[in-house]
Image (spheres, rainbow, N blue to C red):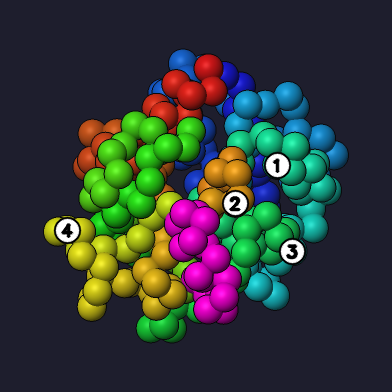
Amino acid sequence: MKASVIVFPGSNCDRDVAVSLEAAMGKKPAMVWHGEADVPASDLIVLPGGFSYGDYLRSGAMAAHSPIMRDVVAKAKKGTPVLGICNGFHLLTETGLLPGVLMRNASLKFICKDVWLKIERNDTDFVCGYEKDDVIRIPIAHHDGNYFADEDTLDRLEGENRIAFRYCTSAGETGGDANPNGSRRNIAGLYNETGSVLGLMPHPERLADPALGGTDGSPMFASLAKALH
């Protein structure tokens, strides 16, 4: 498996995700600067978390126009799996690879804490190491993680089984205080039409090693390494 991590000015989780990928794959991913024109031949492209371009204008808005993103979008449309985490999720919506937008948190405050997520499906390369309806603990760290789409789009996402994760309680309930940022229908992550592009706000790479306090994120990287070897 060959993986590429795209690095933008302001990325701060690129190395974290590279460590998790190397642990799962047994080799280092390529670290690709945003100013490059082409992504090297890859079985997986990762858009990491952070504050690309300082989140000026709007999170991901400037990075979406980086030279490398033209090739990322082209490869995604041809079927190369793409994983966008936090700021990477912003990039996926900004480039139109995923629908909807990510707005300011409902509290208008930056939120950094562990949350509970429910696995809505486990039939993609990203999550085949989990079971459907598993509840996992993963950290969030964002100011603009409030997922919004109109009702027709939300209904379409539900009908096409494209919701990957929902914020929930430790018991798997999705009501009340389970939603940390106001996201519509508790959406924490979603897929494109084919399941080859995944965007999520929580950071699986931040809880993928016992030294970090938990390993609930590691099955995602193990799933990818197994499915794309």
Residue under numbered circle 4: 170
Query: Is 102 above or below relative to 166?
Result: below
User: Which numbered circle lies on residue 47?
Assistant: none
Marks 1,3: beta carbons within 8 A: no
Question: Counting residues from the N terminus, which is met first, the one under dot 2 or under dot 1?
Answer: 1
Residue at (42, 65) in percent of width and height: 187
Question: Counting residues from the N terminus, which is met first, the one under dot 4 or under dot 3?
Answer: 3
Q: Report x, y in % for residue 69.
A: 76, 48
Question: Counting residues from the N terminus, which is met first, the one under dot 4 or under dot 2?
Answer: 4
User: Which numbered circle lies on residue 62?
Assistant: 3
Label 1 and label 3: CA atoms lie apart by: 19 Å
Residue 153 within the magenta-colored segment of the rendering: yes
Query: Is 204 above or below relative to 51?
Result: above
**Element under label 2?**
loop
Kind of residue at disc 4 = Ser
Marks 4,3: beta carbons within 8 A: no
Residue under numbered circle 2: 192
Label 3 and label 2: CA atoms lie apart by: 22 Å
Q: Residues within 10 Å of mark 4 (few under 14, many from 20)?
A: some
Marks 2,1: beta carbons within 8 A: yes
